Image: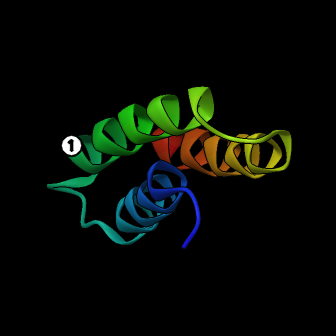
Amino acid sequence: MGNRLFQEAQRYVEIAENANSAGKQEAISHAKNALSSAYANSTRAEQAQLAELQAKLDQYSTE
């Protein structure tokens, strides 16, 4: 099945990516929390992917 927290983080980053301007900041906040939780409970390979997701999220934060 995989790491539930990792999958949740991926989903929240995707939601933030597709959020409209009104809900973008809230979506980014949820995604950051999910990434933080997932990072502590993931393998090194998952952590590398989470770092990529974090970089994407940082890009959305500056738009």
Residue closest to the eye, 54 or 6: 6
Relative image position of residue 43 (x, y in whole percent): 76, 42
Q: Residue at x 45, y 57 (%)?
A: 4
- At 54% from the left edge and 73% from the top edge, which residue is drawn? 1
- Is residue 10 positioned above or below 31 on the image? below
Which residue is at a point 42% across and 66% down the rendered structure image?
A: 11
In the rendered view, does 8 fall on the left or right side of 21? right
Q: Amino acid at mark 1?
A: Glu
Q: Is residue 34 left or right of residue 26?
A: right
Q: Which residue is located at x 24 percent, y 67 percent?
A: 20
Pick the front one: 5 or 51: 5
- Extreme residue toward the left, this view: 22
Position of residue 13 measured from the top left corner of the image (x, y, whole percent):
46, 57
Q: Crowding at label 1, few (<14), some or many (≥20) Cα neighbours within 10 Å?
A: few
- Please, which residue is most extreme toward the front here? 1
Residue 46 appears at what percent x and percent y? 74, 49
Q: How many marks?
A: 1
Give the residue pinned by disc 1.
Answer: 26
Considering only vertical position in the picture, is 24 above or below 40? below
Q: Is residue 39 above or below residue 16?
A: above
Residue 8 place in picture, x, y as percent: 41, 58
Disc 1 is placed on an element classified as helix
In the rendered structure, the answer to whether residue 55 lies left or right of residue 20 reads right
Q: How is the image coloured?
A: rainbow
